[in-house]
Image (cartoon, rainbow, N blue to C red):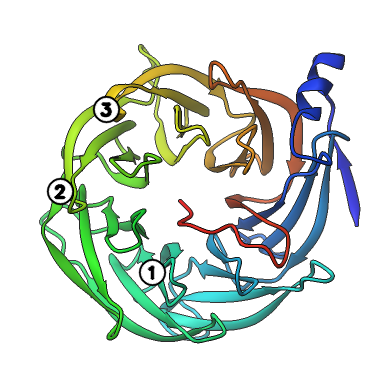
Amino acid sequence: MKWIAWLLAGGAMMIAVLGSGCAGGKLPLLYVGKYNDRGGAGFQVVELDPGAGLFRLAAEVEAGANPSYFCIDGEQGLIHAINEVDEFRGQKTGGITTLALDAASGALRRTGEMAVPNGGPCYISRMPAGDYLLVANYGGGSVAVVRLDARGMPAAVTDTLVFQGVPGRTPRAHMIAPGPDGNRIYLTDLGLDRIMIYELDRTSGKLQSVNNGEVALVKGAGPRHFTFSKDGSTFYVINERNSTVTVFAVDAAGLLEEIQSLSTLPEGFSGTSYCADLHLGKSGRFLYGTNRGHNSIVTFRVVGNGRLELAGHTPCGGDWPRNFVIDPSGRYLVVANQRSHNLALFAIDSKSGLPLLLTAAFTTTSPACLKFALRPGESAGGVQY
């Protein structure tokens, strides 16, 4: 096992900031899914010890080609990673690779795999009841539903929806996940600039459209990732192509009504940039997003009725911030910089909400997805966005 130290800027004051984290100084395990076109293991487990100023590579495992996004089943000790490819085990499909985490040693092992129709998957989520997985296929312009067995393992594909394009535009399903109540399912279609809402028949495993459940965004927006306010009354989506965040009110039936849209870029910026990820801070008072190209984290204050105000921009600590995660304490934020092949660590200022870059980097290759989980045998619970 190799310990990788980082340099701490700001002397004793910075050490004090780091020392104010979780009890014992350690954060939960950080899982890292990667693009591994260059070879090597595609999945890593990293421990962070802010008090000591250390990253520790705890484990890594071969998880197939491009395990670029994943979801965690804390109860069963499983990780389901999509394989973002157009051919999987000789079939013109994408794939799911399932990893098992040994509670005693922390080691990972590959325990199963399944082909997913249509290819090019980019997102996977798990229903809160633990009975189904939902997969968005960017390349295939489709979604799939996968039934889980009693052990939490993928058992069968129960549904696929293949979307039709329009002249000059191709469907690009990007994120599919249940809402906070675990019933409504939300899907972003980046290519056709829309959000769609479904229900899942738990017996058949089929998706059913909800009346008035399709919402159009401005042409060229490119809705990518979304999240909800803590009380579920507001829906936020980050738009890749026009670098905006759109805010929706959520009614009692889970339907969406747009109330605001604002830029993720600083005024006067004229370069090329594409949004990527979006998460709400633990307090619910700040919303964060990433700008690839401008290479920044944008921070918004959440004000009345879920509306947003710009709080500021922070350099991302690398190049092409594809994904990021906030630790369970809400004190730290870690960014996966895909093109500079590093993870960057930030401390979050509790008053301003702005991330403070620590001069820290964990070198890896093409990181694409980060998630924290509790220690083996414990459950994170809830819907992970």
Q: Which residue is mark 3?
A: 305
The amino acid type, in three-letter code, at marker 3 is: Asn
164 shown above or below 347: below
Between the residue at mark 3 and the residue at mark 1, the CA separation in whole angstroms equals 30 Å
Q: Nearer the viewer, residue 237 or 22?
A: 22
Secondary structure under the numbered disc 3 in the rendered image: helix
The residue singled out by tag 2 in the image is 215
Q: Mark 2, residues whose alpha carbon is within 10 Å: few (<14), some, or many (≥20)?
A: some
With 41 as the anchor, is 97 left or right in this view? Answer: left
- Of the two numbered discs 1 and 2 on the same chain, state the one appearing first in sequence: 1
**What residue did someone put label 1 on?**
134
Q: How far apart are the alpha carbons under marks 2 and 3? A: 20 Å
| Mark positioned earlier in the residue sequence (3 or 1) | 1
Is 243 on the left or on the right of 125, as rendered? Answer: left
Image point (74%, 45%), residue name = 27
User: Measured from the top left, where is residue 65 in percent x and y?
Assistant: 58, 69
Among the 4 quarters of the image, the one containing residue 119? bottom left
Pick whichever of labels 2 and 3 is earlier in the sequence.
2
* Residue 258 visible in image: yes
Disc count in the image?
Answer: 3
Looking at numbered disc 1 in the image, what kind of residue is underneath it? Leu
Question: Farthest residue in the top direction?
Answer: 268
How dense is the environment of label 3, judged by Cα within 10 Å: few (below 14), some, or many (20 and up)? few
